[in-house]
Amino acid sequence: MARKEDLRFIRTNRKLYETFFELISDDLIENLSITDICDAAQINRATFYKHFNDRKDFVFYCIGQKVREMRLERTGREKANAATILEDCVREVYAFLRFMTEVNADNLKPDTDAIHLIYDGLMAFYLAEFSAYYAKSKRIVSVEREVFAAYRVGSLLTIAFFALMKGENNISENACEEIIATFVTKMKELE
């Protein structure tokens, strides 16, 4: 497998990532094949598999990368701030969902494979974020850290996706702030 520091590896990942978001503006995520992505990016399938295990691994990478870019634009940092990890997570999920709505709202319709992939991709990304946070934290959590992180992330994504499913595609900043306040209060009560 190619080294992640290798400039060719980075350029190939970037090209695949950019191609992914170009393609989903015209089609649903669930309809994209690896062949479609590779053809559009002008990258060999074998090269794709040197970078990613499968389509799901690739989609999760794209989602995580987009969230990192959005965080960098908003805060100037790539990693979540431990002091505001919940607030960051809420803002980023809503920003990502708004972004996806602008790209192709059909990817966020209920009962599609696309929305399940997006949910799972965000879940994987934030599980890694929260697990890293709790691994560094000196706090004692009554349940295993990963389970606690999964609970928080699952709760957040469920709230966000439920609002989306109810047709609240253009969630306002006020609604986002209200959810953050409620969510943070409830999570602090559980700690």
Image (cartoon, grey):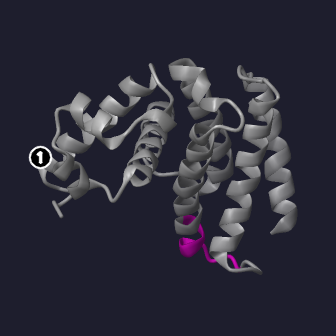
Instruction: Identify the amino acid type marked 1.
Output: Arg
Q: Which residues are magenta?
A: 133-140
Residue 159: % across, % down: 78, 43
Q: Which residue is mark 1?
A: 8
Residue 160: % across, % down: 73, 39
Q: Is residue 147 above or below residue 188?
A: below
Residue 23 quadrant: top left
Say whether residue 89 is left or right of residue 26. right
Say whether residue 10 is left or right of residue 94. left
Task: Mark 1: give few (<14), some (14-19) or many (20+) Cα within 10 Å.
Answer: few
Residue 17: % across, % down: 33, 37
> Visible in this render: residue 37?
yes
Nearer to me, 116 or 87: 116
Nearer to me, 180 or 22: 22
> Visible in this render: residue 70?
no
Question: Image point 46% across, 51% down: which residue?
Answer: 79
Residue 167: % across, % down: 78, 23
